[in-house]
Amino acid sequence: MKFKSLLSLALAAMLIPAMPLMGNAKTYNMAVGDPEDSDQGYAALAFKKYVEEKSNGATKIELFFGSALGDESESFRNVQKGTLPLACGGIANLVPFEKRLGLLTLPYLWTNLDEVVAGTTGKPAELINSYAIKAGFRLLTFTYSDWRYISNGRKPITKMEDMKGLKFRVPQSAVLIASYKAFGGSPTPISWSETFTALQQGVVDGQCYGYIGFQAMKFLEANQKYLTEVHYTYQIQPIVISERVFRKLSAEEQNLMVEAGKYAQEQVLAFQKTDGEKAKQALIAAGLQVSQLTDEDQWAKAAYEKVWPEMAEFVGGKDAINEYLRAMGKPEWNN
């Protein structure tokens, strides 16, 4: 027993010099819904790199990929409570905490990538962030994850009529559910962490995601043979910090987090522009069949005539929609 006690003391003594070094760095955990080799992963790694390099290692970001800390909804809930400092996930999963964030999920809100960027920077971004802050979050980065292209395992989709009879996994988003119904499909809300299995087992026929995320999630292995480039909504996946945590940071630390967010957003946009096409070509080479719509004007018409009127109050009302459109410099919506 005496020998064991002495051995324990010796081991403890060996560890003492390392403890102050470990204690010098502040570590903040970040939950990331997707795998490391996804758009989310790229943004999170860029954020981590900026924070750690600019702070000379005094501040560290610990990343947990693939919903390791729970699904995105759970992670965002913990960020709101302040028990988790940071998280990265789909904007639709923030809507239950602040309905006006659902503006960014309205179908055909944007028509091209330039509009997406304009709507997530400058005044529009400040407006959206003001909503998030009131709900307990601060948006640091808008991760650009491509259009939510529709894939399935049964047949090519080239017109709205082809959607009939197909079941699609969607996030728990009233707007996306209404959109799929308007397009003629059958939406089924399933958590992101359960999506691969649901596709593989045939619980649903398809899902919606951009090429990089599709490749990272290995959806070809889940019977997703056909993909259609439909541009009804662009996948925005913010990195958020708990407002409770943010307020406790020093002014210097707050600035570090904000600047890291800007850096990550710029980096992931560049990544999407280059690697999105690379992922597309790799998937086609691996057997994915990509189709284009012959009637996308009809999809947009269904969105404006059915989904927008139905979902207006759900995303904060017509006034909130038009406030955002004005911030973007776009015409107001007159239903």
Image (spheres, rainbow, N blue to C red):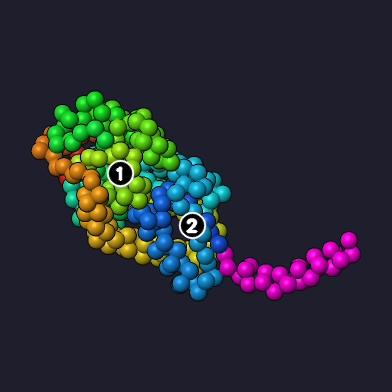
Choose between 26 and 133: the one closer to the eye: 26
Choose between 174 and 326: the one closer to the eye: 174
| Element type at mark 1 | helix
Residue appearing at x 29%, y 29% in the figure: 167
Is residue 109 in view? Answer: no
| Element type at mark 2 | strand
Left or right: residue 62 versus residue 183 is right
The answer to whether 251 is drawn above or below residue 197 in the figure is below
Position in image of residue 34 (x %, y %)? 40, 49
Q: CA distance from mark 1 to mark 2?
A: 26 Å
Q: Check the image and name the residue furthest to the right.
A: 2
- Mark 1 / mark 2, whichever is N-terminal: 2
On the rendered image, what quadrant is the C terminus found in? top left
The stretch drawn in magenta includes residue 272: no
**Highlighted magenta segment, given as a residue range:** 1-26
The stretch drawn in magenta includes residue 14: yes
> Mark 1 sits on what residue?
220
Packing grade of label 1 (10 A; few <14, some 14-19, many >=20) is many
Is residue 264 in view? Answer: yes
Q: The disc labelled 1 sits on which kind of residue?
A: Leu
Q: The disc labelled 2 sits on which kind of residue?
A: Leu
Position in image of residue 159 (x %, y %)? 14, 34
Q: Check the image and name the residue furthest to the top.
A: 165
Q: Check the image and name the residue furthest to the left.
A: 294
Choose between 104 and 321: the one closer to the eye: 104
Residue appearing at x 41%, y 58% in the figure: 44
The answer to whether 232 is drawn above or below residue 160 in the figure is below
The answer to whether 138 is drawn above or below residue 254 in the figure is above
Position in image of residue 173 (x %, y %)? 35, 35
Packing grade of label 2 (10 A; few <14, some 14-19, many >=20) is many
> Mark 2 sits on what residue?
63
